[in-house]
Amino acid sequence: TTSDTRDARSSLYATDIGTRDERPVAVPPTHADRIFRIAPDHSVSVALASDSLQHPSGIVWDVRSRRFVVVSSGGSSIFSWRPGDAQPQRIGYNRGLMEGVAILPAGRMLVTSWRDSSLTIRDADRLTVIKGFPTPAYVSVDTRRNHVAVPVPLENRVDIWAIPPAAR
């Protein structure tokens, strides 16, 4: 699969979306908007803490660009970030309430969104939107068969789709 959260040094990275408080008096989420690094020796550290992450949910290592791509559930921004950078850089937008992200070998990006129950394939400036995924979660890509698996947890299923060919 191309959906990997490890950097070139084999550290594992995970996002912290935080918790949402549904009480009448709003209480800010605790420990949200962070990316954790789990080193090969299993030590855990905060690699990035930034409100600009907007409740990060999906993260994937982009081998070609040597950076992470991070999507947020609290906003519509797609970010790039390299370990050691003080802030993520906005590289695009999607419909919001994003969960999953994957990078295909040729550089196309797959992003899931709860906002419109979709999987978007981003190929430079061309967007292909596949709808019909209520509450789509993270994505996993089978590059050998050219398929994407999209978990739909609230319906207890996984949808598998053929990835459309790249734009020419």
Image (cartoon, helix red, strand yellow):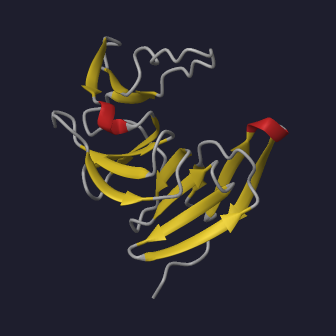
* Residue 163 horizontal/vertical position (percent): 62, 68
Task: Give the left or right position of residue 118, taking residue 111 as reference.
Answer: right
* Residue 162 horizontal/vertical position (percent): 68, 67
Task: Give the left or right position of residue 128, taking residue 109 as reference.
Answer: right
In the image, residue 19 sits, relative to residue 79, either above or below, namely: above
Task: Give the left or right position of residue 1, taking residue 151 as reference.
Answer: left
Considering depth in this image, is 105 or 30 the residue closer to the camera? 30
Instruction: State the count of labels.
Output: 0
Task: Give the left or right position of residue 43, taking residue 111 as reference.
Answer: left
In the image, residue 77 sits, relative to residue 41, either above or below, namely: below
Quadrant of the rendering where the C terminus is positioned: bottom left
User: Residue shown at 32%/31% (left/top)?
Assistant: 51
* Residue 96 horizontal/vertical position (percent): 52, 50
Considering depth in this image, is 35 or 60 the residue closer to the camera? 35
Farthest residue, direction bottom: 168
In the image, residue 69 sits, relative to residue 123, either above or below, namely: above
